[in-house]
Image (cartoon, grey):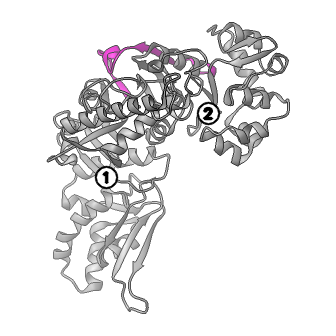
Amino acid sequence: MDRDRIPRLREALSAADFTADGCLELLGATAYAALARSETVPALRATRGGSPLETLVRLFLLQQPVPYERAAAALPVDDCLADGWLSRAGGEVRALVDVRPYANEVAGADSADAWVVSDLGCAVGGAGGIGAAGTATGVDRRDLVLGVGGASTTLAGITVRRPVREALDLGAGSGVQALHVARHAGRVTATDLNPRALHFTRLTVALSGFDNVGTAQGSLYEPVQDRRFDLIVSNPPFVISPVGRLTYRDGGMPGDDLCHRLVREAADHLEPGGYCQLLANWQHIRGEDWHDRLAGWVAGTGLDAWVVQREVQDVAQYAELWLRDAGDHRVGAEGPEDPEEARARYNRRYDAWLDAFESAKVEGIGFGWITLRASGAERPAVQVEEWPHSVEQPLGPHIERWFARQDFLRSRDDADLLTARYRLSAEVVQEQVGAPGAEDPEHVILRQNRGMRRATKVDTVGAGFTGVCDGTLAAGDIVDAIAHLLGEDRVVLRDRVPQSLRLLVEQGFVEPATEAG
């Protein structure tokens, strides 16, 4: 890669409008959505002309050969041939890498146009999407580098996007997270065990116009063992597999030890106030409460933690998912072979997964995200919960406010809570549930239409409190007024309210007026 020539390539991609918006406009919603499912026919039909944008879509997204002359009209083609972006056979050229437009959006940024570079066929669908013969460049499956997928976009959406001085992308892969963090960090260090991954990270950030990202090879925190960061993000190889076949996904450690270590060792690499955010898989062990098990990962680290389990799969579902990801379900995945031999090979590998889980007493696998913060608090806040329901992305701002509310709550006793003023959070609505025609509702529900989109049942006092919660009156004054209206003892009500008030604040239904935006 000649870094001096990359700006010419970037200028050509921009000039052709080879961007996320440009491709959507060219292909239309149907073909664009099909392409995300690795279905190419609709996009092939939409790119039968000869414009530079159509040529680039066919070349990089559809991995079709294009005439040299058309490529030369869209790209500095000889530079691309010399630097290994393309290969030539006769009068046609082919892409050697996947170059995918990506909307790298951060509030306040001048431009969101970026490009993610990965192995051919690996932008969507894992190793199972590259075909029986492997990639066009003959790369060993173990060293494949994937592009943008659902996990990477999830992590990008939950990351706290405040300006930071030093950031770490641990397990960078093709550089998706580094690309995001580079927009709000002074310097980013991207690490990976796979040297090919770091090469792709460098291509991604250089093509997207960033010069504040450095790379370091090694496992976990080893390449940065003496350094601390304001932000650590990681989409690690979290798959719990019996054999570490694929570097991009298999941690190569027993069970969920890799994710456990990432959490345990984060405290040694965070600056005060710093965040560590990662995706993880964890085992549900027979006879153990998974909540307690995950809380144990954080115990003694001094870190605040919010662990959210988004999904649980039984061991058979989990094994099937990742066997498909590796292409093991396809006859011929490892070259020409008899169908019965292919099925027997698949069954042996499936058996190995189930044997490993049975030996470790694993009943299921949880998937979710973990956010840690070095708050320096004497009593760290640790919340471990299951939330399989829909959320609003990007969730990063809501996560940052959750930790701010933990600071507020642990610094105040019940009396202090009542002296503070609160404001109803944005887009919280009240629902009343009861029999038609009934004079009073059976239940009053508060529901969030933003962030985690939680709902909680409140009593008459809670409904009355949130109904006038506009930041002008102290909570205690509101409680006194409600006691007067209901004919209740104000002292008794003041003793009762703080417990429910803490819950409303912790879950984000109301926010301290000084903290709410």
In the rendered image, residue 309, in percent from the top left (x then y), is placed at 33, 47
Residue located beneath label 1 in the image: 386
Earlier residue among tags 1 and 2: 2
Q: Amino acid at mark 1?
A: Glu
Residue marked by disc 2: 102
Q: Is residue 69 magenta?
A: no
| 228 in magenta | yes
Q: Nearer the viewer, residue 16 or 341?
A: 341
Q: Position of residue 249 (x, y in %)?
A: 40, 28
Could you tell whether 333 is left or right of 276 in the image? right
Residue 314 picture location, percent across and down: 31, 47
Q: CA distance from mark 1 to mark 2?
A: 31 Å
Label 2 SS: strand
At 65% from the left and 44% from the top, the residue drawn is 34
Numbered label attached to residue 68: none
Q: How many other residues sit within 10 Å of disc 2, few (<14), some (14-19) or many (≥20)?
A: some
Q: Which residues are magenta?
A: 207-234
Is residue 281 something one can see in this rendering?
yes
Residue drawn at x 28%, y 41% is 305
Q: Is 60 situated left or right of 436 in this image?
A: right
Q: Is residue 432 left or right of residue 268?
A: right
Q: Residue at x 44, y 30 (%)?
A: 342
Quarter of the image containing the N terminus? top right
- Contact check, label 1 and label 2, Cβ < 8 Å: no
Q: Amino acid at mark 2?
A: Tyr
